[in-house]
Image (cartoon, rainbow, N blue to C red):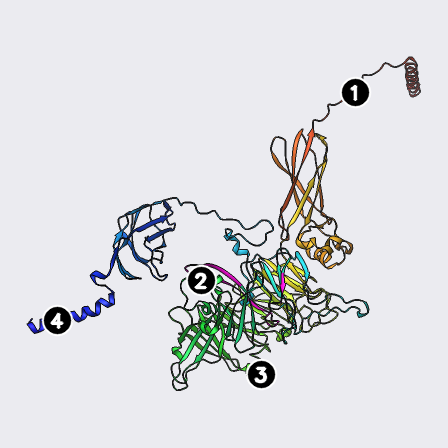
Amino acid sequence: MNFRNMANLAVALILILAFTFPLFAIPSVKAYATYKTYPLIDAIPNPVGVNQSVLINFGLLNYLYRETDGWNITIIITKPDNTTETFTKKTWSTGMAGFYYTPKKVGTYYVQAVFPGEWYNYTGPAYYLPSQTDKLPLIVQKDPVPSYPGHTLPSEYWTRPIDAQLREWYSIAGSWLAKPPNLFAPYNDGPESPHILWAMPIGDSMGGLAGGAVGEHSMADGDAYEGKFADSVIINGILYYNKYPSYFYSPSPQQEIVAVDLHTGKVLWSKDLKVGNRRIAFGQILYWDSRNNRGAFAYLWVQTGGYGPQNWYAFDPYDGTLKFNITNVPSGTNYYGPNGEILKYFMTNIGNATHPNWRLIQWNSSYVVSKGKTGMAESWGSQVQGVTYDAKRGYDLNVSIPALATPGSTLPGSIVTVFPCDRVIGSRITRTEVNLWALSLKKGSEGQLLFNTTWKAPAAWVEGNVTVSGFQGGWGAFSQESMVGALWVKEERVNYGFSLLNGSYLWKTEPQSYADAWADTLMTMFGPDKIIAYGKLYSASVSGTVYCYDVKNGKRLWTYNMTDPYHESYITNNWWAIPLFVTDGKIYVGHCEHSALNPKPRGAPLVCLNATTGEVIWRADGLFRQTRWGGRAIIGDSIIAAMDTYDQRIYAIGKGPSSTTVSAPDVSVSAGTPIIIKGTVMDVSPGTQSDAIKLRFPKGVPAVSDESMTDWMLYVYKQFENPMTRGINVKGVQVSIDVMYPNGTSIHVGDAVSDSSGMFSYVFTPETAGMYTIYATFAGSKSYYPSYAQTVLYVTEAPPETPPPPEKPLPPYEMYTIGSAIAIIIAIAIAVFILKRK
């Protein structure tokens, strides 16, 4: 290399270094400080069982100054066979972080944290020196180390709040924030009995029979077009409902939101939220996870505005105070995201026909609040109080749709449903074809076309001018679980199944009853009449028949007829049926009318069916008549909340508490003497403590068997005749009688059954002297949680037997009389003998 080339190379190196040093932010020798570092490593638990997760905590005791900053740490794990695994992790600004590691072999592992050294610039450049920890022995043993034992689900009547340590209870403590997709309400133990916990007037008007000169007519029930009880929600065991109707018309001149504890029936608060007499629109439970704040936040949302931009107001469900509000919220369907955030989806062309630029857009309610925030401001809770946010901040996804990049390319129709984090599904239905398409929402492929299919419709659709959209035709149900959509054609009374994986046509069901031509397909307040759950399509509508189909092939699995034995219904021999919700392997179905007759048809049923077999779990005729234009029964905390249009009351349905008493003789008895053990089993649900019930049942309300529950609840809460007076046998509950003998041995001595007064009795004979403890246990039922009581009995020794008195000698007169009688007998015997000889 010549001198000129060497000179050029030197100039080049100088230029490279001049650009390189700023990129790496290495300060001059005299301009920076150096700091010693203090590394740490820990393993929790230690020792640990093989295949158990262990938390590896690592980092430096040197903290950083900005919340987004962190140290780069290398963690080296040496296994028992001397092989190693290396992880490079970043700490939090505290200098520390952690991750879970699962050892696969028994033996001693060694864990070490290595800090390679790092420049850090806050008030000035500084270099933090390299360091490393000693190797920490991690003992991995064959046997697992104990974990927290956990807790069983409640075996007694329970209330809110639930202690956060009772994690397992999440499975029975669901909320109802809005009408869920497919009316599927998980995290509930579906009631297996129509047992009533409490009843209360809905509070906006009188209910029940008008009486007097009005005759058999009842008070108006606020059904047709009024929307009473619509949009009710349940959050953490509290029912929230709009006290006044006016759903379809202008806002009511007054409005109150009522909060009722589902477990106690107590009204917690009732107030006007001061937002133009508006109603609750929906509820929300948002889980927020940030560096400084992790937890769930609940809200009641009230919205103003029509089909254009809306204003949303978030109220605290605890006491109804306003927390924050959002302006300019775009209209459109709400979907709940994985953490409870509210999402909306749009497709728009920000280009033109010649140069299209179609975008898939997601609006996120939580992003409206958190956009651009860091540090403490990133937290939720008090950080949002009193703030007004512009919804235009909330677009957290805006991606191109490559399939529409070519001029003239289209996706026919519009968005019909969305599975957040998975796909957007769109469709167009005409009498000649069904178009179905989907765009991806999965991370990394957002906006990509998943499928775009066209299915040629049967010629009969054109010939019959069939209804394929609107209130009574079109898409009736979508399922993310089964990835199936069901399309309803009114005149054919048939469901068509389509795959939501690839858009292909799958099956066609048998026709349903003619009356189902008036079924509702809109998945709004009126519908749906069709739902998909547990791999099955359920359809229940005007005909009063519940149909169940297999979503894999469309074959009918079972039907259930909601029969009207007294023919009060005016459409078919069945009651008009509507699905209420599905939970816990059960489907609940009720009755409604389009425009309620008056006098009202009597005996309207609410039915609980086994969702797999169609078997009736319970049916309550006349207890809970549903609405069509208002809100149907909902469920939360494993308790059903239902408005009844017979008496304008709200009922809570679920397993209730019971109370058992037992007594034995208060005075001692001697061994071998039979005694009577007696007691009662009573229903002590909140409703039995009301003034009206106490006046009618001053000694309390007896607990009865599950099979007697419907007739008994009609008697207790609706003042029907005592079932016994109508020839209906009311069965009580079974009580186990157990005795602990004086020697400490416990024995089950028998069972008793209570009667319609709640009383039971049992005859027991103590055999030995001493103190006895007697237990009476009601094991619970589908209607009641268990209860028990105990008493004591003292038994004395049996008295000794009294010997018979000695025989006394007979007096002379008596001896003479006896002797004469004997002589006469002998004489007669001799005479008889002589006569026989002759």
Q: Does the magenta stretch include residue 288?
A: yes
Alpha carbon separation for disc pair 2 and 1: 95 Å
Disc 4 residue type (three-letter) = Leu
For label 2, the SS is: loop
Pick whichever, 576 or 697, lies toward us: 697
For label 3, the SS is: loop
Q: Residues within 10 Å of mark 1 (few under 14, many from 20)?
A: few
21 vs 349, left or right, is left
Q: How crowded is mark 4: few (under 14 residues within 10 Å), some or many (20 or more)?
A: few
Q: Mark 2 points at which residue?
A: 379
Instruction: Say which label, 2 or 3, has the lower sequence index.
Output: 2
Q: Magenta residues?
A: 269-298
Disc 2 residue type (three-letter) = Ser
Disc 3 residue type (three-letter) = Asn
Residue 231 position, x and y percent, is: 59, 68
551 vs 641, left or right, is left
Q: Do the residues labelled 1 and 3 touch (CB within 8 Å)?
A: no
Instruction: Say which label, 4 or 3, has the lower sequence index.
Output: 4
Residue 9 numbered tag: 4
Q: Nearer the viewer, mark 2 or mark 1?
A: 2
Q: Nearer the viewer, mark 4 or mark 3?
A: 4
Disc 1 residue type (three-letter) = Pro
Residue 223 position, x and y percent, is: 67, 71
Residue 155 position, x and y percent, is: 58, 49
Q: 728 above or below 750? A: below
- Visible in this render: residue 777? no
Magenta stretch, main secondary structure class: strand
Q: How crowded is mark 2: few (under 14 residues within 10 Å), some or many (20 or more)?
A: many
State how many labels appear.
4
Residue 465 numbered tag: 3
